[in-house]
Image (cartoon, coloured by chain):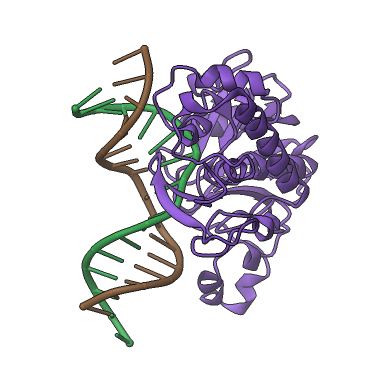
Chain colours: A purple, B brown, C green
DNA sequence: CACTTCCCCTGCAAGC
DNA sequence: TGCTTGCAGGGGAAGT
């Protein structure tokens, strides 16, 4: 479940393996809804281009190309962006890795879940986009062109201010958690960090957004920034599939306070962490600390 | 218009 | 042991 920290870690580490390199060839999986730009067109647009820089907008990555066009990528739920010098053992689940013949484990070989493969003129390590559940997205943008998915994004969670959130909550008849997950309000927050920030700010996820006070909004924004920055610093959360472009897993999952800790004692008051469904998502909170 | 439900997909774990 | 079932959730489309 890549959220802002995982996408930012991906951005930083793929940049070193992508910027300045010229694409000589492109291979894709068969057409599917992963491709907002059809594979044939995508190949035509990318071949011959050099990567200038990698930008992040919410959970989207944009690779700026030397003709001012862009390759947009969303990792979805299980997306992985990495280069081919990463041992394949790191990328696959333990059972899938065990099923591979020993020789095949040394280097990654594109499989059915590999939707994009970039080959470079320098003949160095290839870059792959792999996504088992195909919730990810690939999109090519002409120079100056945008896309409604990007246009719709609200303020980046790292830039958000308390008063922004407070203003966004007024008159909203939905839960504060649903609001935090709404990418049109705050860009980059997903299920893990919403739960963690709500816990730190001592706000119950199911609380009506309109009933969250100005002070609590300020606390929430501070908590959000804290957990997001902490996670980036520790390489993101690798609870299920996330892996950084260099093959390393994140470590933030070790420091999480509530997410996927139902039944465990709250770090503050020892009350068992409760799990409920809020905004159609598994939601974890301390029933004593969070009001 | 605001909000909720459904659904895309696959791997894995729990239950029978 | 092996099958079926349920669950994970980003986010857009469709429904209320």
In this view, A30 is above or below A181: below
Residue A87 visible to an observer of this rendering: yes
> Horizontal and vertical percent for residue A240?
55, 59
Q: Residue A251: percent from the left, percent from the top?
A: 70, 58
Query: For this view, does A66 lie left or right of residue A263?
Result: right
* Closer to us: A195 or A121: A195
| Residue A36 on image: x %, y % | 46, 30
Above or below, comparing residue A139 to residue A252 in the picture: above
Q: A41 above or below A226?
A: above
Please state if A128 lies on the left or on the right of A211 as rendered. right
Residue A101: image quadrant is: bottom right
Q: Where is residue B8 shown, x and y percent of the image?
A: 33, 44
Q: Is residue A287 above or below residue A160?
A: below
Residue A112 visible within the image: no
Question: Is residue A245 rendered to the left or right of residue A58?
Answer: right
Q: Residue drawn 71% across and 60% down?
A: A86
The image quadrant that residue A14 belongs to is top right
Residue drawn 45% across the image and 39% down it: A34
Q: Residue at x 56, y 30 (%)?
A: A44
| In the foreground, A213 or A168 | A213
The one nearer the camera, A120 or A153, is A153
**Relative horizontal placement of residue A254, taking residue A208 as reference (left or right):** right
**In this orientation, which residue lies closer to the viewer: A188 or A33?**
A188
- How many dots with numbers? 0
């Amino acid at each position: 479940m890549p959220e802002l920290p995982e996408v930012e870690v991906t951005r930083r580490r793929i940049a070193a393996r992508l910027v300045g390199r010229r694409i000589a060839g492109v291979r894709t999986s068969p057409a599917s809804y992963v491709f907002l730009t059809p594979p044939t067109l995508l190949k035509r647009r990318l071949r011959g281009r050099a990567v200038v820089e990698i930008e992040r907008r919410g959970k989207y990555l944009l690779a700026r190309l030397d003709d001012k066009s862009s390759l947009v990528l969303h990792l979805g739920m299980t997306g992985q962006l990495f280069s081919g010098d990463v041992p394949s053992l790191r990328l696959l689940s333990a059972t899938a890795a065990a099923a591979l013949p020993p020789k095949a484990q040394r280097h990654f070989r594109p499989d059915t879940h590999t939707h994009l493969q970039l080959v470079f003129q320098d003949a160095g390590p290839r870059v792959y986009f792999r996504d088992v559940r195909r919730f990810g997205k690939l999109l090519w943008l002409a120079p100056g062109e945008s896309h409604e998915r990007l246009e719709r994004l609200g303020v980046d969670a790292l830039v958000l201010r308390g008063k922004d959130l407070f203003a966004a909550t007024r008159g909203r008849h939905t839960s504060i958690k649903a609001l935090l997950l709404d990418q049109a309000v705050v860009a980059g927050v997903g299920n893990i960090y919403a739960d963690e920030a709500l816990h730190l700010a001592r706000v119950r996820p199911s609380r009506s957004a309109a009933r969250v006070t100005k002070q609590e909004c300020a606390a929430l924004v501070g908590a959000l920034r804290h957990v997001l920055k902490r996670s980036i610093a520790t390489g993101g959360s690798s609870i299920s599939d996330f892996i950084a472009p260099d093959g390393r897993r994140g470590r933030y999952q070790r420091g999480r306070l509530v997410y996927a800790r139902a039944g465990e004692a709250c770090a503050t008051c020892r009350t068992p962490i409760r799990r409920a469904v809020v905004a159609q998502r598994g939601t974890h909170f301390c029933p004593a600390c969070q009001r």
